[in-house]
Amino acid sequence: LPLTTSPPLPPPLHFNTTMPTRSPLPGITEILDSNGNTTCFIIKPIAKTSQTHFFTRDEQNPQAGFIVYKKGETIRCHLHKPVKRSIEGTPETLIIRQGKLNMLLFDKDLNEIGEFLLEAGDVCMLMGSGHGFDVLEDVVLMEIKQGPYVGRDEDKTFLEKTDIKRLEKNE
């Protein structure tokens, strides 16, 4: 489905970013890198639709969208076939259950994409971008990511904030 451009979510979502964003539905912001690749979706609690709508594209991993059913309809019992899929990387989804945190996003070349405030009720789908967080209030996160877990040393490269090429701050 084509994405439409809409105004960004109300402050303080974007602290500082020069990267483009798109809004596939009100309350959902798709954050792009300098090459136009999706780095993250931030889904605010106000996001809703009256019809089924997947806001990720077919080739993206993971897939996400809203599925809408009316009272009295039936979702047929089903199994998912054991289709082999090959993925690279570890996309992860964070559900912010409590608190606030500031997220720093950066691309694979360690260029800052921007900083974003995440609050209780938000869902953040990280699509392969680098990220770090400053906890602003006590936070409870639910994390969903592709398994199996291969161990911390095999899974992550840890960096210092000074390793990230930061955007110029306009203050």
Image (cartoon, rainbow, N blue to C red):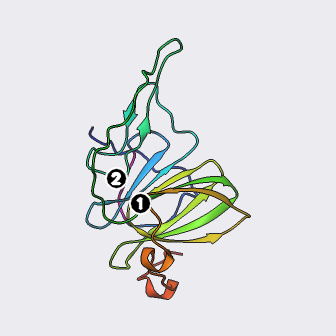
Identify residue type, mark 2. Asn
Q: Nearer the viewer, residue 119 or 17?
A: 119
**Looking at numbered disc 1 in the image, what kind of residue is underneath it?**
Pro
Q: Which mark is residue 61?
A: 2
Q: At which x and y percent is residue 107?
A: 36, 72
Give the image location of residue 72, x and y in percent: 52, 11
| 71 w.r.t. 77: above or below | above
68 and 5: which is toward the camera: 68
Q: Find residue 33 and report its horizontal and vertical position in percent.
A: 33, 65
Label 1 close to label 2 by CB (< 8 Å) = yes
Quadrant location, the N terminus: top left
Nearest to N terminus: mark 1 or mark 2 = 2
Marking on residue 128: none
Specify whether residue 112 is in view: yes
Assess whether residue 20 is covered by the magenta stretch. yes
Note whether 2 is above or below 119 in the view shown.
above
Q: In which quarter of the image is the C terminus?
A: bottom right
Label 2 sits on a secondary structure element that is: loop
Is the residue marked by circle 1 packed among few (<14), some (14-19), or many (20+) residues within 10 Å?
some
Q: Give the range drawn in magenta.
A: 19-23
Which residue corresponds to mark 1?
91
Which residue is located at x 27 percent, y 50 percent? 84
Mark 2 Cα shell of 10 Å, populated few (<14), some (14-19), many (≥20): some
Q: How far apart are marks 1 and 2 (CA)?
A: 7 Å
Q: Can residue 167 be seen in this view?
A: no
